[in-house]
Image: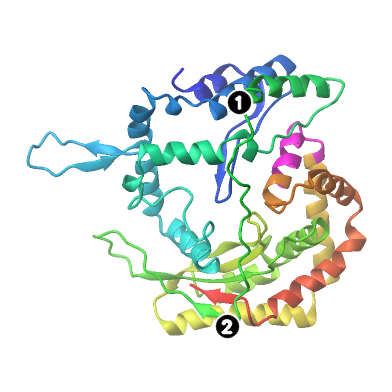
Amino acid sequence: MKEPFVEMLKGSLKTFLNAMTAPDKTMYPVASQNKQDFFNLVNVYLDACLHPRILDPVLGPEIFKQEGWHYEVSEDPTAPLTYKGVVYNEMKGVYSSPDSFNGRVLKSALFKDHPIYSIDSGGDPDDIPNLSYEQFKAFHDTYYHPSNARLYFYGDERELPTEERLALLEEYLSEFERSPSPIENIPVQPLAKEPYEVISYYPTAEKSTSEPKQFVTLAWLLSEESFDPDTKLAFGILNHLLLGTSSSYLEKALIESGLGASVIGSGYSSSLQQPTFTVGLKGVNVGDEEKEKVTSLIVETLTKISQDGFEASAIEASLNTVEFRLRSSSTSPMKGETFILSRIYYMRVNDCSMLHHLSKLFVLEFGFRAELFNGLSLGMELWTRPNCTFKI
């Protein structure tokens, strides 16, 4: 079957079916409330992940050329060879987006010289043609081996007993031996000693008549350690207070300043091994003076908030919003995906204490308010540190 995912989407009773790539992990979540449908989906997922057709010694190189990259010959015999390929073309599209460009430069600069986070996991179109099939296969054999995987189930034990879950996995995992490749730990990125600036230039349309603009983004690497679940939740509240709505403290200050077209940056994020905070404006007039205005506005606003604090009504509103989201997710038919994906995204990549994190999540869902105020204070202290800021 050429496209199993497309076929599953047509006839499955799934509640979730997708795959996602992050800089340090690839995730294949699937779910269904129908037991037989769930087993069918999991079988296809396990087979596709562990036995992809691209590893076939005969078909593999041709699939690699189609999906990765190959030379394209023009009908014009005088025209030069060009590169084509599904992934290659997709990444060319990604690299043509100024917003995407800003995000890549931001991460690369924040994790300067980091062996994983400073590079683009999707592939740079300039470098993709340097990848050989042999290199691709060696990478898959090393990193997509079951020894390097974490497999999670979520569901009612009465509907899907543990014995049945393990039997399903055994069917696929029993043929593998433990990988001889050593377990790799993601290096910790040291905090910068002082603020630094990175300037990069993004391409614009050749015939564009609009006035050139710039992105101005400030970013913080908040810690050399992953936050514990209590602190992560507190920072989520803090992020909502700062950027969650158009009336949030920092969001409002940036919008009303008129210095740019729109606010950029996700604010607080713990999707990588170390937590970060990014915020800025795009559509800013070109020039150092405008850049400094944006920089000063962000720093001064955060400093003022750290000194004055938040209004009690604003804190209560943010707590209510986050609590509503948590309660909604706990009653959703997709709550299994919500719990597991949130743990995969937000747990420290090298931390295997999964049950501890899940138990903390359940505790925090409905009893977190009294613990959050210390976290809010800690968050504002981090933003007043002078040693972890830079701007693009």
- Depth check: give the residue in front, 147 or 386: 147
234 lies left or right of 42? right
Query: x, y (%) of residue 233?
Result: 79, 57
- For image coordinates 78% across by 32% down, the residue present is 154
Residue type at the position of mark 1:
Leu
Q: Which residues are magenta?
A: 330-342
Query: x, y (%) of residue 324?
Result: 81, 48
267 lies left or right of 106? right
Q: Quadrant of residue 312?
A: bottom right
Q: Which residue is mark 1?
A: 46
Q: How is the image coloured?
A: rainbow
371 lies left or right of 272? right
Query: x, y (%) of residue 67?
Result: 38, 34
Other-residue count near label 2 (Cα within 10 Å), few / some / many at <14 / 14–19 / ≥20: few
Q: List the single residue furthest toward the front.
A: 180
- Depth check: give the residue in front, 214 or 55: 55
Q: Which residue is mark 2?
A: 296
Judge whether 91 appears above or below 193 on screen. above
Q: CA distance from mark 2 to mark 1?
A: 51 Å
| Predominant SS along the magenta part | helix
Of the two numbered discs 2 and 1 in the rendering, the one whose residue sits closer to the viewer: 1
Q: List the single residue furthest toward the left.
A: 78
Residue type at the position of mark 2:
Ser
- For image coordinates 68% across by 18% down, the residue present is 39
